[in-house]
Structure formats: structure tokens, C-alpha cells
Image (cartoon, rainbow, N blue to C red):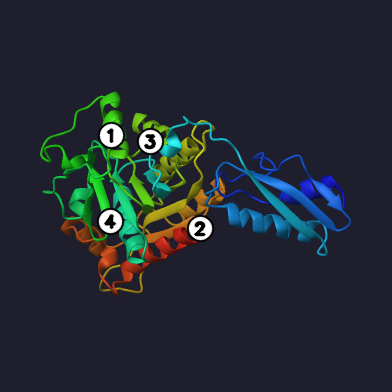
Amino acid sequence: MYPQQIIDALSHVRYPGNGKNIIESGMLEDDIRISGMHVSFSLIFDKERDPFLKSVVKASEAAIKTYVSENASVSINLKFRRQTVPSNQTEALPGVKHLIAVASGKGGVGKSTVAANLAVALSMQGKSVGLLDADIHGPSQPKMFNVEDARPVMDDSTGRELIEPIEQYGVKLLSIGFFVDPDSAVVWRGGLASNAIKQLITDSHWGELDYLLIDMPPGTSDIHLTIVQTLNLTGAVVVTTPQPVALVDAKKGIDMFRNEKVNVPILGIVENMSWFTPRELPDNRYYIFGNGGGKQLADQMGVELLAQIPLVESIRQSGDDGLPIVMQEGHPAAQFYLDLATKIDHMFEK
């Protein structure tokens, strides 16, 4: 064995967060050591809680055995880059293990519905979960959780006054919708909106959480930059519909997270409203918004298609009623969100 063989083999290993191989991503340290049939090297990740750490390590070991020698023994050391973010970023929410953005390139694709059901599904699976509704101009989580009239109180048990999130269905919830007139438009410039989101993040008593999901505004804006500058995001889930117009905007959203100044791993794509099945024809599927667009985008961007969720009236109705569909035991649509939660949670298993 010689070093170039190792490099060539590892060029077959893709880092799912950006779709590039680990050589292109600069993840291989210049410390390859070979002794007989034993090879050791270091892989560099941005952070210790990288959602793809385990899968990349396993794939790297398999690549050496596949492309170099099946008799090779492999030792992989892990190194972590210093975060190119403000030093106080990692301290913003020290009690939260994983911070996941749920984003979309455009509005109207069901991002908030996915975020709400995913949060409740994770909670139902025994995780401690928070949900921050960061859509300043169109907050919808208070309605989806049936807490539109709730008003958070201040808590001073930590030595400073912090906003206490509203707890509903096992999820800690905060939204600008709790603090503004629900019948009036929020007409704020970017700076004011960004400051409000930063306050909901840093001046709130989130406590110890396994997951904090952030229901992002659609598109790319000042608020997105504020969030990634304030929080050390673990990863992002991008929601889209299969139609080409939505896919174009979803691609822009993925590019935003992959920007070297943002550098947030893409956990995968959720294709929403994938097909419509009439109640009277349960075996039929009608692809109203196109067929397979989410899979095509996932393949193009080198990320995983996490779920395909159909267009079902009861999902919409349950959201309007403030009772996420995932809570309706035995409902066929609930399983889509439970499977999505399981798939994401498995990414972070030790």
C-alpha cells in the first residue's frame, strides 16, 4: 500500500452534508501512515457532534478495504476544526444537544407543518424537544399547537430573567406570535426582526434539550444569517414540493447553508405534497405537483431524501385544529412523520 492509493480510495467517500467527497471537502489530514497492511490517518470534522461522523468513518474504512485491499486494517483518528464563528456562539444554548433548522426556499410548501409534526414525533419517541418559530412575518406554530392565547412569563430561577417557553404536547414552544397582535401584520425592518429572533434564542429558558428545531422563515434573509451567527447549528432539513418552481428555490436554500461562511450540514430533503390519494380511491396516487422532483434534487445536490409526505386533507385539518396529525395514533399519515423523526434521531446515536 502507498499513500496515493489511500487518497484515491477515500475520494469515493461522500460527505452527505455537502455532497462532495471527503478529499474535495478537505477532510483528510496530511498524516497518512502505512505499516505493512495497516494504515492510519486522520479525518477532520467541523465539530464533535457532526451528524455524519459515524457514517463517514464507516464508509472510509469500507473504501480502503474495497479499493486498496480487503486485508487492510484501518485506524482513523478524529480531529475537529475550530469554528469560524464568534466565540460566544457555542455558549448561546449550552443545554441543547442538537440544533436543527427546518427550512424552505419558498413559502407554502408545508415547512411549518413538517416542523410541528417532527417536533412532536421526536417528543413521542422520548426526546426532550423545543421548537422556535422564527418566521417573524408569518408565525403559525401557536395555531398549530392550539396555544394562540398563551402568553409566556418571565422566569428568574437561573439568576436572570428569561422567557419561559410554552409547553404543549411535550414540546417547548416560542414564537413571536405570542407577543404581537395576531390580527395585525408585523411590519419590521430586517434589523428589528433579527434582534427579536436573537432575543427569543438567547433570553429564553430552554433548559436541557435533546433537540431544538427552528422553523425558519422561507427564503434567505437577514434572519437566517442572524440564526447561523448566533447558534452553532447541527444541521438543516430542507422542505420542498416536487414542482420545479419550488425545487429551484429549495436548491438556493441548500446553497445558502453550504456557503463557506455558513457551513451548516444538510441532513436531507423532505418532499411534501408528493402525491394525492382520494379517500374513495385509497390505492390511487395523483401527482398534482409533479413526480419525483425531490428525489432528483437530492441526487443532484448529493443529499438524502428523508421523506415523501403525501397531500392529505387530514394533515391540513389537524394543523388548523391545533392537533398535529402525528398524535393521532394509527392514522396512516402519522407514520410518515414518525419515520422521519426516527431517521433523523438515528443520525445522532452514539
Q: In which quarter of the image is residue 309?
A: bottom left
Q: What is the C-alpha distance between the residues marked 1 and 3?
A: 11 Å
Q: What is the C-alpha distance between the residues marked 2 and 3?
A: 22 Å
Residue beneath disc 4: 171
Density class for disc 4 (Cα within 10 Å; few <14, some 14-19, many ≥20) is many
Q: Quadrant of residue 193?
A: top left
Q: What is the C-alpha distance between the residues marked 1 and 4?
A: 19 Å
Residue type (three-letter) at the residue carrying disc 3: Ile
Residue at left offset 79%, top offset 45%: 32
Q: Which of these two is toward me, 181 or 331?
A: 181
Q: Are marks 1 and 3 in contact (CB under 8 Å)?
A: no
User: Who comes first in sequence, dot 2 or dot 3?
Assistant: 3
Is the residue 283 above or below the residue 31 in the image? below
Give the label, 1 or 2, closer to the camera.
Answer: 1
SS under mark 2: helix
Question: Which numbered disc covers residue 227?
Answer: 3
Q: What is the C-alpha distance between the residues marked 4 and 2?
A: 21 Å
SS under mark 4: strand
Residue at left offset 71%, top offset 46%: 42
Please state the horizontal and vertical placement of residue 258, each as a whole percent of the image. Answer: 52, 38
Please state the horizontal and vertical placement of residue 211, each as a whole percent of the image. Answer: 38, 53
Residue beneath disc 1: 199
User: Who comes first in sequence, dot 1 or dot 2?
Assistant: 1
Q: Do the residues labelled 4 and 2 touch (CB within 8 Å)?
A: no
Q: Are marks 4 and 3 in contact (CB under 8 Å)?
A: no
Residue type (three-letter) at the residue carrying disc 2: Met
Q: What is the C-alpha distance between the residues marked 1 and 2?
A: 30 Å
Q: What is the C-alpha distance between the residues marked 4 and 3?
A: 20 Å
Please state the horizontal and vertical placement of residue 281, each as a whole percent of the image. Answer: 30, 73
Residue at left offset 45%, top offset 60%: 345
Residue beneath disc 2: 347
